[in-house]
Amino acid sequence: MDLGLSPSVKYWLQFVHPVMMWGLLAFMLYTAYQGFQVQRTRNAQGEEKKELIKGKYNIRHFQSGSIVLALMVAGSIGGMAVTYINNGKLFVQPHLIVGLSMTAMIAFAAALSPFMQKGANWARATHITINFILIGFFVWQGITGVQIVQRILSKS
């Protein structure tokens, strides 16, 4: 697909997605830490609970999770767009399929928020399970993404 972009711009665009996604993985781990702190706060007693409440982890986790959702969707679409711009097609391989699955998973995990806010433990357990699986997939995506970047670099 020719959008009138110079070959140099098209080449460097290929690295936006991997850099963004590695940053997102780090931010997602931080968001998971905040979620763990929310759980600690929920289960704490006395002074420990008072101290944890001061961290406002529930608010910070919700806000971070919203950012993760937005960046995951943008990163998925952006990765596919750049691949299509540079190759005129998408490569239907495990990296693409797992990436799309992850985008759906993060949407499902976020959609559980209203139920969790109403105290539904099934929603909380499902949210946590989905996100643990998601982080595992994300690490795998990072490895396969590095392999893709190596292929791009070896062609140039």
Image (cartoon, rainbow, N blue to C red):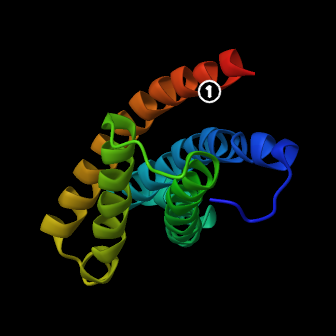
Say if 24 sits above or below 38 in the image.
Answer: above
Residue at the image position 75 percent from the left and 22 percent from the top:
156
Query: Which picture quadrant has residue 152?
Result: top right
Query: Which picture quadrant has residue 5?
Result: bottom right
- Name the spot of residue 131 as percent of width and height, x first: 33, 50
- Name the spot of residue 55 as percent of width and height, x first: 62, 61
Left or right of 15? Residue 117 is left
- Name the spot of residue 1 as percent of width and height, x first: 62, 59
Left or right of 134? Residue 115 is left
Residue at the image position 19 percent from the left and 57 percent from the top:
125
Residue at the image position 19 percent from the left and 59 percent from the top:
126
Which is more toward the observer, 82 or 130?
A: 82
Residue at the image position 84 percent from the left and 49 percent from the top:
9
Tag 1: amino acid:
Val
Say if 70 sits above or below 147 in the image.
Answer: below
Density class for disc 1 (Cα within 10 Å; few <14, some 14-19, many ≥20) is some
- Name the spot of residue 136 as percent of width and height, x first: 35, 34
Element carrying mark 1: helix
Question: As drawn, which residue projects farthest toward the top?
Answer: 154
Which is more toward the observer, 134 or 77?
A: 77
Which is more toward the observer, 90 or 143?
A: 90
Left or right of 151? Residue 98 is left
Left or right of 54? Residue 103 is left
Disc 1: which residue: 149
